[in-house]
Image: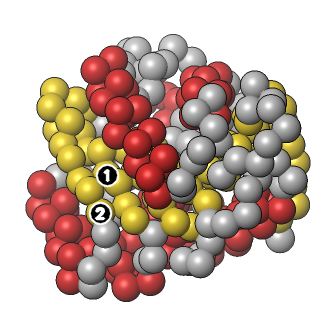
Amino acid sequence: MRTTTVEIPTPDGTADAFVAFPDDGARHPGVLLYVDAIGLRPVIHEMARKLAAEGYYVLAPNIFYRHGPAPVLDVPDLSSAEAREAFFARLMPLLDELTVERSARDADAYLDFLTARPEVRPGPAGVVGYCMGAVLAVRAAAESPDRVAAAACFHPGPLVTGTPDSPHLLAPQLNAELLFGLAEHDDSMPPEAVAELHKALGDVGVRYVSEVYPGTVHGFTMADTAAFSPSGLQRHWERLLPFFARTLATG
């Protein structure tokens, strides 16, 4: 296994990113891993390494690179409500500045970099995203339908917003197959939003699998937060790995 930090040129600067891939001299399918709102940090590195060990070149960019290299903000112990409130108060301006237009430019740059790597096998990539990263994953798949074969979304941020740029309205642009791992208790995607998402995808024939993970809350895959669910994380791997193995044809 090899891990390193790389720099990705974008229209707005240079994004740093964590990379993990098998050190076997072979070419492997590329996967773009979008982080949650907390950002690029050790728990994301570990998830990228685990995914890479299954035979993928995994690129996890610092989505807040416009504000400096990761970690852009020092992440405190988020187990207390007070610490979470203070941290997210500092984080919100960064989230607000990552507009739809900026994230689209970034996605193009990330996919350009990923598909040009000599360690990456030719062909469409996979995308996986967590929390707000799931929203970015859907947008990337819709904006580059010829370059993304599969997109997996876990405890996604709002995919149905009631605004003209709501992610679920991108369904007609999607060519990728989608996988959704939803939290049982999640204000970001309440049951009515999930139903609207499913309808939008079904109306245009998008291939997707969607599942609610019992006993989980938003953020259940992240081992460094109070939302963490070991069983939820395990189920996530049990769904994600076969999904990518089938859609990206590893091996």
Q: Amino acid at mark 1?
A: Phe
In this view, 84 is above or below 115 = above
Q: Position of residue 35 (x, y in %)?
A: 56, 42
User: Going by the image, does 91 lie left or right of 4?
Assistant: left
- What numbered label is drawn on residue 108? none
Q: Is residue 223 above or below residue 158?
A: above
Q: Nearer the viewer, residue 194 or 76?
A: 194
Does residue 117 appear in this view? Answer: yes
Question: Between disc 1 and disc 2, whose residue precedes?
Answer: 1
Instruction: Say which quarter of the image contains residue 68.
Output: top right
Question: Can you say which quadrant of the picture contains the N terminus?
Answer: top right
The residue lying at 40 percent from left, 42 percent from top is 242
Check disc 2 and give the amino acid type: Tyr
**Front position in the image: 82 or 150:** 150
* Front disc: 1 or 2: 2
Q: Who is closer to the viewer here, 27 or 103?
A: 27
- In which quadrant of the rendered view does residue 159 lie? bottom left
Q: Residues within 10 Å of mark 1 (few under 14, many from 20)?
A: many
Q: Position of residue 160 (x, y in %)?
A: 29, 67
Q: Compute the Cα span from label 1 to label 2.
A: 8 Å
Q: How many marks?
A: 2
Q: Give the colour scheme shown.
A: secondary structure
For residue 180, the mark is 1
Q: Which residue is mark 2?
A: 208
Relative side of 91 to 2, left or right: left
- Secondary structure beneath disc 2? strand
**Is residue 3 among the parts visible in the rendering?**
no
Q: Do residues under tags 1 and 2 come within 8 Å of each other at their CB atoms?
A: yes
